[in-house]
Amino acid sequence: MLTLSILLFPILAALLVLAVGGKQAKQIAFLGALVELGLSGYAFFNFVPDATSQFSFDYPWIFAGSIRFSAGIDGVSLLLVVLTGLLTPLIILSAFRHTYERPAVFYSLILFMQAALMGVFTARDAFLFYLYFEAALIPIYFLAASWGGENRIAVTFKFFLYTIFGSLFMLVALVYLYFKTATPAGLHSSAIVDFYNLNLSSTEQTWIFWAFFVAFAIKMPVFPFHTWQPDTYVESPTPATMLLAGIMLKMGVYGVIRLLLPIVPEGVNLWGTTAIVLSVIGIVYGAIIAIRQRDIKRLIAYSSFSHVGLMAAGVFSQTSYGIQGALVQMLAHGINVVGMFFVADIITSRTNTRLLDQMGGITRYTPKLTVYFMILLLGTVALPLTNGFVGEFLLLAGVFEHNNILGAVAGLTIIFGAVYMLRLFQKTMFGKTTDFTTGFNDVSGSESWVFIPLCIMVFWIGLVPNSFLKLTEPAVANLLQFIK
Amino acid sequence: MLSIILLSVFGIVLLYLGFLKSRAVLLPATLFFILVALGAGFLEWNKSYLYFGDMLLVNNVAILFTTIVLLSAFMVVSLSGDFLEDENAQPAEYYAILLFSIVGAIMMIGYENLIMLFVGVEILSVSMYVLTGSDKRNLRSNEAALKYFLMGAFATGIMLFGMALLYGAAGSFTLTDIKGYIALSKGHPSLLLYMGVLLVLIGMLFKVSAAPFHFWTPDVYEGAPTLFTAFMSTVVKTAGFAALLQLLSVSFSAIYGFWWVMLAVITALTLLVGNLTAAYQNSFKRMMAYSSISHAGYLLIGLAALGQQSKPALVFYSLAYSVSTIAAFGILLVVSKQRVADGRPDDTYTAFNGLSRQNPLLAFILAVSMLSLAGIPLTAGFWGKFMVFSAAIDKGMVWMLVLAVLMSAVGIYYYFRVVIAMYFREGSSTHIQVAPFYRFVLIAATILTIVLGLIPGLFQNLM
């Protein structure tokens, strides 16, 4: 029943926000998100670390119960549920500093988005997963296209078409798999677990592998499906960018772990290395572009693209290290990237520019911002004892185990990451002050309340990674059994 | 059966009601008549009857198709309040013709005999020719009516020719007799039969505007008064597909190997032409015309992959498609009336600019309709597509599925242009008013679309 409340509560909260509307909208939305955080926190602390699905429910839904409304939390879902629960209130809080037109609609869309994301991460039925996967697109599209920058309509439309185009391939694969299953009663089943045990020929596996891969690769995005990403991140309002980079791209990685690997293990054996090569190209390519960026938001967008490449590579390595690393890194990256976008938002809205050349010397005015920025930055560049290190180390170990050379190339991410991130820090915080940065105000109270939980998480994951890893381990071991 | 008799009588009654001074009674009377016919249809639920010397069959599937037709008619009529105010219009005649045309549609749905099919097709088509040209002072309406009539008559001729050939081969017009003949011929029926099948199919495919027999569609849809376009694109399509389903599943399932390739090619062509051309339109009305062609393509998948899945898929798809299409046309009617370009109502995409601010409710309803037509999950349209795709997979037509999926991605492009115009583009700030009953019908359609999207089983369980 806990999962059911996690799924339904944000929708109720969103409707309440819409109904009350006006000035109270953001407070109600924030409170709703806090309650949701409590629910996911309860799941986190009461989760028994084994491979089973917990707090689950299961109701017959469509076609005489062949398609079921069933969801639950297992080791693979847990960290993402926690991530969504944790980031949403922070994203809402970070939006407080702006006044958005029609706030009720704005905040309710964020909550609808949260409901859909929770659904993706907990669904245990393939079609339920697909429905949530698509449903998540609608609120984020409206958020980005209604409250975004100048060029928002064309950019978000590209994003929308691109992602929906990808997931249609997944739909084909799911329908195909659905008709391969058979239950004793002569019906079909769309439970994800039933898809794991199908006997598929290697031709079928190849096709289904690519259908899934395209869907998830566009979502993440993996090179060469990334062209929608930088523009969309830049044009969206910051809360939408945070949702996209912090949580939504994890849908792709999660999809690979949940569906692609266990359903088509032979397909992964055949094509996994190709996928890793693409991901590694993305790592290097994204990092090089990030190094050359002059636009602060675009720089973070490309850094996110580079980081997710490593997650994809780790997952496709089919090793316990790689998958565990991806799960932890998804949590860590979500925290870091939301923090980075918040820093960027604070800087750009106070200086009225996004260009690095026009910034400098901010640190002179802002001791607090400098500290928060530095902590998040260290997490992003994977310094030991921060959250990024745990994830990236495991991921690299996984890729290395799979293929030494690819592992070595992927390892460049740590060096490149340090280069572009430190350059970002140096260009904005140090150096001479400019006309834009003179008299910069330090972070206010409510802004601090966004940073503090993020910084705590950076160290918690970095110092005691085992409190997270031990939760995911049995589920990952179980998953690898299906693959082998 | 009862509904056929009732509707014919009601049509005549309506003509007489036209003599009354007050036109206000016409609309509620027509709605009432449709509801009565709808209720009468359900008296025969779960029973299977043959009428008129075994020429007409009434069973649950037929009743469901009839319900969709009547529901579409109900929606169209309830959106037709403008006729009562337009002094050039003759609402009594329009409504009477609508009711008569439904009689034709019901005959097409439940026929057991090709004569019945022909009569049904003619009743429906002739009514449509008249309604297309009903805006007498509008040159485009006249042009459309003439075009439709000439092309339609030609297609009917071909179909009749085909029926004659079928009779020549099988010696009977009855569907089950034709089936019996095919069974007796042990896989070698006469050439006449094959020719007959081909010609009848061409005639019917013309009526449902499948490519390459679709060229009349955009012009006729654009020229006809918007409401009758809505009626045409839903009722004719539903009845046409019900008729095709009946023909192929009852009579010709034994020679599936002969016609499925042809139908599959036509399906692929229809999907390509409909979707790719729709993407290039600037007029919303023309886009809807091409979109109706593309939906004919999706429905044809259900026929080309004829099997157990086909019947429920077609019924559900027709329902989802009809409800959303009529709601979309209903909103076009309201919006284009307020925007005049070149002395005509503006039916381009730009007419919808900024609708979300002028009337959020209308914008929401149109958005849901567009989502449903595009087949986005949690709307009825998604499950319609899902079921049709399932039928294709069941028959192993994976290539067809891939094509259909690619084309629905194109569909998302042109349907979302409307959503973008409504929500993200600036328009004039005039508020758009809608009559309460009009609003009620549109809301009901939206609720139906969403409920069927959440729980498609509601309707599924009826079959």
Image: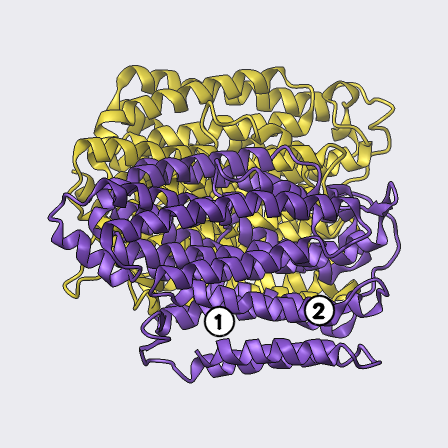
Chain colours: A yellow, B purple
Q: Are marks 2 and 1 on the same chain?
A: yes
Point 64% across, 19% down: residue: A293
Q: Is residue A459 above or below residue A19?
A: above
Q: Can you identify the residue that label 1 sits on? A: B67
Query: A184 or B240, which lies in front?
Result: B240
Chain letter for the residue marked with disc 2 in the picture: B
Q: Are there few (<14), some (14-19), or many (20+) residues within 10 Å of tag 1?
A: many
Q: Secondary structure at mark 1?
A: helix
Residue A390 in percent (x, y) is at 39, 36
Point 32% across, 52% down: residue: A75
Residue B76 in percent (x, y) is at 65, 65
Q: Looking at the picture, which amino acid does disc 2 mark?
A: Glu
Q: Looking at the picture, which amino acid does disc 1 mark?
A: Thr
Q: Secondary structure at mark 2?
A: helix
Query: B401 or B77, which lies in front?
Result: B77
Compared across the picture, whether B222 is left or right of A310 comes to: right
Q: Can you identify the residue that label 2 sits on? A: B93
Residue B212 in percent (x, y) is at 48, 35
Compared across the picture, whether B281 is left or right of A364 comes to: left
